[in-house]
Image: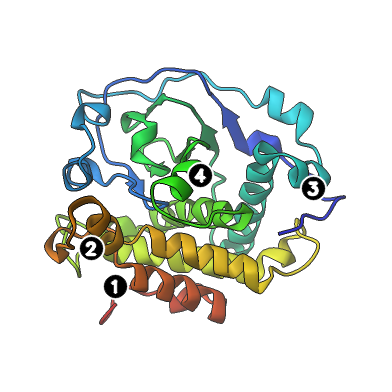
Amino acid sequence: MDFDDDAQLDASQVEDSRGGGGLPFGGMAFGGGAVGVVGLIVALIFGINPGHIVGGGGDGGASSSSGNLSSKCRTGADADQSEDCRIVGVVNSVQKYWTGEFADSGRDYSVAPTRLFSGSTSTACGSATAEVGPFYCPGDKRVYLDLGFFSELHDKFGAKGGPFAQAYVVAHEYGHHVQDALGTMRKVGDSRQGATSGSVRLELQADCYAGVWAKHAVQTGFFSKPFTSTDIADALDAAGSVGDDRIQKRAQGRADPETFTHGTSAQRQKWFSTGYDTGAPSRCDTFSGAI
């Protein structure tokens, strides 16, 4: 994954609140890069301490700044040299793609910032710790990411890792922002677990949207050339490593489809591939028919 050295980065799209604290949880956040969180259910399924992510109402008041990122993340050359700047570049590319896609269909895309945090953070959905993985909060329309998660993706979930695995995770979370903007999140309703639940369908669609962006990423002007087969393989490996079945088998020795919230490894890989192979958001309809 190589950035165009001359690409101009917009660090204002990434807030840096690393080292900040959090407030009690209230509301619902949507994860998917790995364990993520879809309310309390996900905490219970994956054994996360509910006190880490659920409590009273929060207001998303954590302080943040993009000042340091703005000074060091200016061009694509910076993105090739720094993980922080790489995240900025991916966020910029993903949002430029969706801005154009929305415009083509007569809609306005609202830019959503990514907030980098460490330890814990406050959101309009309440407070969250790094244990919940990357997530999107519709209450304040932000993606939240602890960069330490990428080490967890390798060490805990067995993914190969790599820069494009990181890009997949970021693009997936922005898939949730797209769903929020289009009103798709309402389709989940009370169907938050089970092999064919609304939650699973929502997560698989976000995987598909990540693949769609990957297909068009070079056209956004941030990358010097199309992604390689190795890049795509890293994304597929990351998607497979965080399937419900694989996570549950690692944690408890068996998979329980009745408690699935994100889809199986095979499904996550299938839907990312569908997005990447077709490049068409319209082909990401996971809410109709079999998945």
> At x 39% / y 66%, what residue is drawn?
205
Task: State how far apart marks 4 and 1 are (Cα).
Answer: 29 Å
Count of numbered tags: 4
Q: Earlier in the sequence, mark 4 or mark 3?
A: 3
Q: Position of residue 165 (x, y in %)?
A: 55, 56
Query: Of the residues shown, which amino acid type is indicated by label 1?
Result: Phe
Quarter the C terminus occupies = bottom left
Name the residue type under label 3.
Gly
**Left or right of residue 38, residue 74 in this image:** right
Mark drawn on residue 287: 1
Please state which of the two labelled residues, at mark 2 or mark 3, is closer to the viewer.
3
Q: Nearer the viewer, mark 1 or mark 3?
A: 3
Under tag 4, what secondary structure?
helix
Q: Name the residue under label 3.
A: 76
How far apart marks 4 and 2 lie (CA) works out to 27 Å
4 vs 2, front mark? 4
- Residue at which label 2 appears: 198
Is 93 on the left-hand or right-hand side of 204? right
Q: Which residue lies furthest to the right in this view?
A: 6
Say what secondary structure mark 1 lies in.
loop
Between discs 4 and 2, the one toward the N terminus = 4
Note whether 163 is above or below 145 in the view shown.
Answer: below
Q: Where is residue 173 in the image (x, y as percent from the top left)?
A: 46, 51
Amino acid type, label 4: Phe
Q: Position of residue 97 (x, y in %)?
A: 63, 61
Query: Looking at the image, which is closer to me, 69 or 35?
Result: 35
Q: How far apart are marks 4 and 3 (CA)?
A: 21 Å
Image quadrant where one finds the N terminus? bottom right
Q: Earlier in the sequence, mark 2 or mark 3?
A: 3
User: Which element type, helix, strand or loop, lies under badge 2?
Assistant: helix
Dot 3 crowding, Cα within 10 Å, few <14, some 14–19, many 20+: many
